[in-house]
Structure formats: structure tokens, C-alpha cells
Image: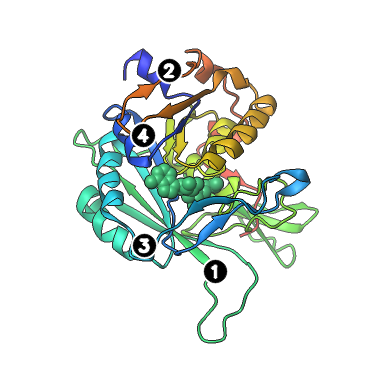
């Protein structure tokens, strides 16, 4: 990647169609792509009440989610572009649910190769609602692929650990045990079923943007599959969760969305984050509009050293095994 394109890909929010934004990026310029496109619910999503006065636009239409027949041809084209923009060994995380994930997997096995499929991650959560005629659907599915690397350098993967609380102190030989306000615990390696709380109405990070995902989910993905300084992209940014996780972990980011309310919500959230995130100021972030003719109008560029200045807050970045303080 040349120095200019690297600069453009750090701290950049783009109002654009996902396909246009992906198509505008250079080949092999991205280390990880995460996308959370509409699931095909057939719903019109409106803004919710956020926490602490956030989500002032509650009730306003944020975006439409088409019928269950997705993934559409457009999504298939997007997968091709994602494969192109990833560097060899780069990672792709596709977040969907039971409605369309099976169709997407067939497409991705063709594009990335079935041997490059690494995990079907289940994000399990507890929300209200108990249906009478089937089991309650309480998980999303995240497909994890890597792009082939003909040079055989492989992909980045850091095994992560999380706390597992114990009924009492076990004192097993060779197993370290710790204690905090939640009781005795030990660390265990993360498997492919992740229990992370849904963002309830009083969740601190809740912006009011519908279908906002927890930062903890994105932090896990970025910690596991990237290194500090790597570049992360998300073409369905919503409330800007991927950018926030990237800022906290010292990763470069380029994200975008076509919705006006996504831009408004992300902007407020990312600027707040920039104020509290070591090494970032909101003037380092470029807010762009990508016209549908695929011509870019570049906004303010980030300083070249912002990547170095971005604070890496989690000790896990300098350790082989990352650790999370989350019950699982
Ligand atoms: C499920 S939400 C993403 C939520 C996000 N992960 C978060 O944590 O806030 C899906 C987003 O995709 C956007 N979207 C839908 N179709 C799009 C398209 N063709 N191009 C760009 N954005 C699109 C919607 O505006 C919406 O913000």
C-alpha cells in the first residue's frame, strides 16, 4: 500500500453504498473486514431511545431491511470485492442470522474456498420473548473466512481467554484461580460460542441506533484476528461500533454506511470516543461522501502518524493470549 492510500484508510467514515465503498479501495489494502448487513427481516428499523438523552431522534426511520430472500446479487458482488481488498491471509467476518446465513455460506465457500472457512461463531444473548410454536431464537451467526495466501504466510490469530466463574475454589493442580467481586474464577480459552449481553435500554454504550452491536463483540473479533496498527473495514457501519472498537485497540479503520442517521449517530459517537481515546482527536477523522458514480470526494486526511499515536489500551495487545473480563 502506498503512503497516501494508507493515510486515507485511517480514521475514515464514508457515506456510501457498501459496494461502491468496497470497490473504491485498493487491492490487498485491508487486514480484516467485518460486515453486519441487514438480515432480511422485512422490517423497517426505527431509532430507539438511547441512554442518557442519546437517540433524540427516537421513532425516526433509520433503514429498511428487505425480504428474506437476501443475500442478493449485490451482496454476492460485494463478497467478491471484499476478497479483492483483503490482503492475502486477511480475515472476513460476516454477521447474519438464521434467515440467510446458509445461502451466504454457499457463496463464500465458492469465493474464499471451503478450506478457508475457519469458524461459525455463535453469538448467544438473552432477550425477551418466548414463542409458543418454536424454540426462542437467541443467537446470531458470524462466519469467519480467511483469504488464501499463496506465499503460505498464514493468517493472524491470537487465542483469547475469558473468565470462567467457579462455584467455589477448586484448587486443581496446575490451574491458576483468582477471585474478584464475582467470586472465584479461572481463565479458559474462547470457543466458537460467545455469550455477550444484548444492549439493553440502560446499556452505557447504547446510542439508539437499531440493531447496534456490542463493542465487546467487535473487540473480540479484532483482538483475535488483527494486530495493533492493522486496518479494519466495515461497509455497514450503523452506529459505528467497528470504528469504536478499532480506536480502542489501536487499529486503523475505514467504515461507511448509506444511511443519514447512521452518519449522524456514528459521528457523535466516534467524536466522543476520539475525545476519550488516547492519541485520537476528532480532526483526525475524515467524513466523506462517496458518490454513486464511484468518484471519491476526499475530506480531511488523517495525519500519517495517527496510527502510531493511537492508544493501545488492552494489555492483550502485547501478550500472546488476550484476556476478557466477560462471563461466558
Ligand atoms: C444491522 S445494521 C449495522 C449495525 C452496526 N453493526 C452497529 O453495530 O451499529 C445494518 C446497516 O446497513 C446499512 N445498509 C443497508 N444496506 C446498505 C447498503 N447497500 N450500503 C450501505 N449500507 C447499507 C443500514 O443503513 C444499516 O445502518
Give the quarter of the figure containing the N terminus: top left
Q: Label 4 to label 3, Cα distance in Å?
A: 23 Å
Q: Residue furthest bottom?
A: 133
| Residue 148 sits in quarter | top left
Q: Label 4 to label 2, Cα distance in Å?
A: 16 Å
Residue 7's tag is 2
- Residue 45, image x, y percentages: 54, 56
Residue 21's tag is 4
Mark 3 highlights which residue? Answer: 101
Q: Nearer the viewer, mark 4 or mark 3?
A: 4
- Residue 219, image x, y percentages: 55, 43
Q: Is residue 39 left or right of residue 241?
A: left
Task: Residue at 50% x, 38% y: name it.
Answer: 320
Q: Label 1 to label 3, Cα distance in Å?
A: 15 Å
Which one is earlier in the sequence, the residue at label 2 or at label 1?
A: 2
Mark 1 highlights which residue? Answer: 138
| Cβ atoms at labels 1 and 3 below 8 Å apart | no
Q: Label 2 to label 1, Cα distance in Å?
A: 40 Å
Which one is earlier in the sequence, the residue at label 4 or at label 1?
A: 4
- Residue 131, image x, y percentages: 57, 81
Amino acid at each position: 500500500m502506498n503512503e497516501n492510500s494508507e493515510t486515507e484508510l485511517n480514521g475514515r467514515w464514508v457515506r456510501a453504498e457498501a459496494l461502491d465503498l468496497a470497490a473504491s479501495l485498493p487491492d490487498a489494502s485491508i487486514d480484516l473486514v467485518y460486515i453486519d448487513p441487514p438480515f432480511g427481516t422485512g422490517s423497517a428499523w426505527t431509532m430507539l431511545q438511547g441512554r442518557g438523552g442519546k437517540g433524540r431522534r427516537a421513532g425516526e426511520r433509520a433503514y429498511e431491511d428487505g425480504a428474506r430472500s437476501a443475500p442478493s446479487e449485490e451482496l454476492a458482488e460485494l463478497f467478491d470485492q471484499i476478497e479483492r481488498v483483503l490482503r492475502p491471509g486477511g480475515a472476513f467476518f460476516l454477521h447474519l442470522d438464521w434467515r440467510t446465513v446458509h445461502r451466504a455460506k454457499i457463496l463464500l465457500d465458492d469465493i474464499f474456498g471451503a478450506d478457508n472457512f475457519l469458524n461459525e461463531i455463535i453469538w448467544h444473548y438473552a432477550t425477551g420473548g418466548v414463542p409458543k410454536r418454536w424454540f426462542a431464537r437467541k443467537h446470531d451467526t458470524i462466519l469467519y473466512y480467511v483469504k488464501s495466501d499463496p506465499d503460505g504466510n498464514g493468517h493472524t490469530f491470537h487465542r483469547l481467554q475469558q473468565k470462567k466463574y467457579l462455584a467455589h475454589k477448586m484448587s486443581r493442580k496446575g490451574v491458576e484461580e483468582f477471585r474478584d467481586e464475582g467470586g472465584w474464577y479461572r481463565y479458559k480459552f474462547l470457543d466458537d460460542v460467545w455469550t455477550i449481553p444484548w444492549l439493553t435500554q440502560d446499556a452505557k454504550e447504547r446510542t439508539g441506533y437499531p440493531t447496534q452491536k456490542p463493542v465487546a463483540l467487535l473487540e473480540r473479533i479484532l483482538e483475535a484476528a488483527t494486530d495493533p496498527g492493522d486496518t479494519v473495514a466495515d461497509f455497514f457501519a450503523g452506529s459505528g461500533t467497528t470504528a469504536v472498537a478499532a480506536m480502542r485497540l489501536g487499529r486503523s479503520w475505514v467504515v461507511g454506511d448509506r444511511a443519514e442517521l447512521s452518519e449522524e449517530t456514528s459521528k457523535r459517537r466516534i467524536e466522543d470516543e476520539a475525545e476519550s481515546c488516547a492519541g485520537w482527536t476528532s480532526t483526525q477523522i475524515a467524513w466523506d461522501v462517496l458518490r454513486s458514480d464511484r468518484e471519491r470526494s476526499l475530506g480531511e486526511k488523517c495525519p500519517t502518524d495517527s496510527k502510531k499515536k493511537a492508544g493501545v489500551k488492552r494489555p492483550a495487545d502485547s501478550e500472546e493470549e488476550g484476556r476478557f473480563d466477560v462471563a461466558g
